[in-house]
Amino acid sequence: MNTKTQELTRAELEIMQILWQIEKGFVNDIRETMPTPKPAYNTVSTIIRILEKKGFVAHRAYGKSHEYYPLISRTEYTSSFMTSVVNNFFGGSIGNMVSFLSHDKGISVSEANEIIKMLKEEK
């Protein structure tokens, strides 16, 4: 499966959010950025290795230490994720998604128009 179409678990996404923010870091750097209660070092290390196997993260080795960095940007992941949501839940129709949001989540007509405007500018 291509990393651009692969969804992240909540724990993986939390680690990626931190890596996108700090750009690169060792397990302790990532762990220190996490909210309290902080997960165990081994937990963070395991999640990072999973992200590396999935192709989202790579590392530079400094002896036995590894500095991790993202291979995919937040924008690339968000774009892929949202495309998947639109395709899987709204039949590929952004209009259907905007309609759902306006009815179910109460977005205003002006917000819906702003969404449509942004999407048109992206194309």
Image (spheres, rainbow, N blue to C red):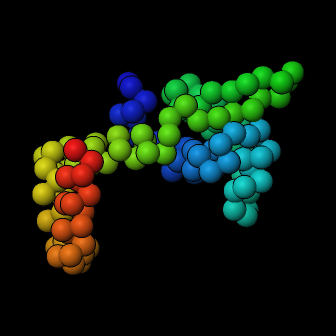
User: Furthest residue to the front?
Assistant: 121
- In the rendering, at what x and y percent does residue 31 appear? 74, 49
Along the viewing direction, whichever of 67 and 75 lies nearer the viewer: 75
68 up-or-down from 111: above or below: above
Residue at image location 55% in from the left, 31% down from the top: 71
- In the rendering, at what x and y percent does residue 83 appear? 27, 44
Instruction: Determine the image quadrant of residue 57.
Output: top right
Along the viewing direction, whichever of 41 and 60 lies nearer the viewer: 60
User: Furthest residue to the right?
Assistant: 63
- In the rendering, at what x and y percent does residue 91 appear? 13, 46
Q: How many marks?
A: 0
Instruction: Determine the image quadrant of residue 2.
Output: top left
- In the rendering, at what x and y percent does residue 90 appear? 16, 51
26 up-or-down from 21: above or below: above
Side (left or right) of 15 relative to 81: right
Residue at image location 42% in from the left, 40% down from the top: 76
Q: Is residue 48 visible?
A: yes
Side (left or right) of 2 relative to 64: left
Q: In the rendered image, which quarter contains the N terminus? A: top left
Q: In the rendered image, which quarter contains the C terminus? A: top left
Residue at image location 62% in from the left, 51% down from the top: 21
Q: Is residue 11 visible?
A: no
Instruction: Determine the image quadrant of residue 110.
Output: bottom left
Side (left or right) of 122 relative to 47: left
Residue at image location 27% in from the left, 48% down from the top: 122
55 up-or-down from 48: above or below: above
